[in-house]
Image: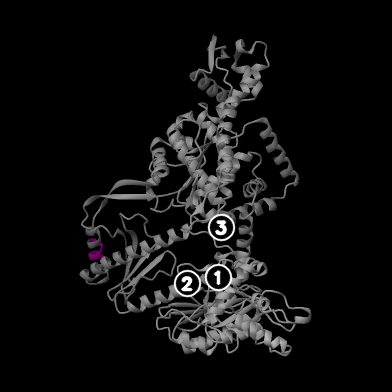
Amino acid sequence: MIQFIQDKENCSKHAALKIATELANGNTTEHTQNTDVMGIASKRAAEAENFAELFNRQKEGLPRSPKAQEYLRNRCLEQLQEVGYNSGVNWKKLKQCITFPLKDKNGNIVSLYGRRITESNGHNAEFGKHYYTENRKGLYPHYPDKHTETLIITEAIIDAATLQLSIENNQYSILAAYGTNGLTAEHKAAISQLSNLQEVIFFFDGDTAGKQGATKYSEELRKDKACLVSTVTTPDGEDINSLFVNYGKEAILQLIEERQPVDLKASQLSNNLTIKQYSNQTKAATAAVQTVHALSPLKTDIPNKIIHQTPTARYIIKGSLPKTFDRMLVSLDVQHPETGIKYRCRLDLYEEKQTRKEAREASEKLDLRSDLVENDLSQLTDLLEEYRDNQLQQSTEENSNDKALRLPEQAKCKAFLQKEDLIQNLNELIGQSGIVGEENNRLFLFIIGTSHKMKDTLHALIQGSSGSGKTHLLSKIAALMPPERVVKFTRVTENSFYNYDEYFFRNKLICLEDIDGLKEEALFAWRELISNEQLSSSTSQKDENGNIRSAQRIVRGPMASICATTHGQIYEDNMSRMFIVAVDESSEQTQKIMNYQSKTASGTIEKKLEVEAKEFLQNSIRMLKPLKVINPYADKIKLPPQAHKIRRLHELFLSFVKQVTLIHQYQRKRDGQGRVITEPEDLKTAVEIMFDSIFLKVDELDGSLRQFYEELKNHIKTKSNPEQYEFMQREIRHALNISKSQLQRYINDLVELEYLQQMGGYQNRGYKYKILWWDDIAKLREDVKQYLKNQIDRLENNNQ
């Protein structure tokens, strides 16, 4: 019996003897108070032994309890290190708790907290959820570090434990209160000892009690401690752990970022001013106070007007400042401070002689000292430079940030990105957004488009004949990306790429609707942005003395891109840097498009559902993070040796595998450095999706030319003796329903590549042709597919 009690209670033999004595004497715990929450076994053991030893035994008992482990898994707390399990069994009351240690300022365990893992009902309904050992003392997870600058106080220990898994790099210190009325004297004393404390954040539950408790303690602490006190607005019905389970740590970090200071005025609170905005305003106000008695700073609160006031005059800049750094051309009013008379001019403040001349003429008209006006203009130039730099930096930061998602949106997108058949579900949603057919191409382009957020971006070139729908496909794919990240061009001048702001292209998806119209200089710049991720040009500008000097101008990437073209081979150098996608120009695809157009016109298709699908895909992309990827199978897949420019193609293939892995980042494992690990399934998916692009690199015909040639061969095979059959262009135009100009290009290309032979005829009556090279593209395609499939099969077998 003693051994049974020792095993069942997970206690020492000495404690088991005491329990057995009490049971033998009939001393059951019928009238034990609920405050003795660990049960009689744990209480006696705690009295007889050190709390640290008791908790260590409870930690050892945790792996032996499937029920306790399931509870931690359901709350996403299985990674916690300091947690135990106490079975706490007596005769009539079953207490099953996961346990947490409470520590004193020296880090010693001086008390324990238990959280019941079974629901209270029936005969044991008088038992609650939260239990502490008698004479509770100590703090969880421990006393805050003496160097703490920001402290988060949670409502419960479970919440504090959850927060430890959500916050990385010790950005905040964490302290658990013992309920909405559980900020004890020990808590307050520990907080008062933090000499470096700058902010206390209350993160309580989203119910009425939690909101009232956070408000009460925030006001108390703000009176006792000279630091900023703020509260996190928790959604109704949620707590930290439920947020972590339902929405992930990103939602928790977002709420902390959006916390609100307690000492804001009512007008500020009504505008939902966050602590970040509040801190920025405080810093700005402090900086303004420090410059009160110096030259007055710029007044920029009036749109398109900048005002600078000095003891000498009032200077008014009208309109916006130039964004280029080699000039400061402004429309300037110089106003007398007393009479209000103005002198108006337009000058480049970087032109020393011009500035001196305008200062002299303004002084003569307004009866001011010329040297003082000239000095003011020099100082004004410095202030305008600083203001312009700040504005450009702020604009760059805003453009690089994704639109913030609400918690329900985050939860919905995260659940979607965690689904097993993610690629198939993505393709279905892309179809629902209004892209008809093109099942493989649309998925391929979508994944390429999502790479704009990543360090290693991807690029695609869509090939198709005039009117084939290539531009439509490009526009539809671009519409699935977050609009704040997309830039579309219909025309690009020769040097325009060099004139953008330095970070304009960074992490954007750039779409060129027709690359055929780009001149060679623009194409060169485009290639450099893709290959080297930056453009560097030498320009001329004037220095402060008016002398012309050389200066370097840089435009930086990386950026992703999708372009469209009616040609292929003429962009051979570009093609080696991009994935090639051939538009489906088959009659079956034409029929799909016509059916869709008919359903749209008849009202059968709900446009609202298309918009919802598009917006959901945009939000899902916003949830993707630019993480690093490790591909342990990078050397296990070899591309077909007959592929053109196989070195660059292999690099493109590995990059696409990486992007497929990142699409699955909410499902894949990570190493100790937080890098996402590629799985064989990612390689298989990548090969299936980009197989057509790989094959286009094997085939010497571009995509649209190959489609035409296969249709031509099928038509000729219907004739008797097809190998000797001669045809004219008119016959093919009518049979394949193709334009004269398009057919002429195809015929010329095939003759040049020796697939067709001109057999005679006349220029005015037309020439005759016959097929010279009957290649078996189907067999070649199957051979390449089998070549790749065999490698993947071996990889999957070895990985099992």
Above or below, 334 against 770 in this view is below
- Residues at marks 2 and 3 touching, judged by CB atoms closer than 8 Å: no
Q: Position of residue 532 (x, y in %)?
A: 38, 44
Mark 2 or 3, which is nearer the eye?
A: 3
Element carrying mark 1 = helix
Residue nearest the viewer, comparing 252 with 492: 252
Report the Cα–Cα distance between label 2 and label 3. Answer: 22 Å
At a point 63% along the width and 64% down the height, the residue shown is: 408
* Magenta span of residues: 357-361
At a point 50% along the width and 87% down the height, the residue shown is: 188
Q: Quadrant of residue 545?
A: bottom left
What numbered label is drawn on residue 276? 2
What numbered label is drawn on residue 255? 1
Q: Where is residue 89 in the image (x, y as percent from the top left)?
A: 69, 79
**Residue type at mark 3?**
Met
What numbered label is drawn on residue 623? 3
Q: Position of residue 160 (x, y in %)?
A: 55, 75
Check disc 2: other Cα within 10 Å, few if <14, some if 14-19, many if 20+: some
Which secondary structure dominates the residues rendered in magenta? helix
Residue 104 located within the stretch drawn in magenta: no
At a point 53% along the width and 31% down the height, the residue shown is: 696
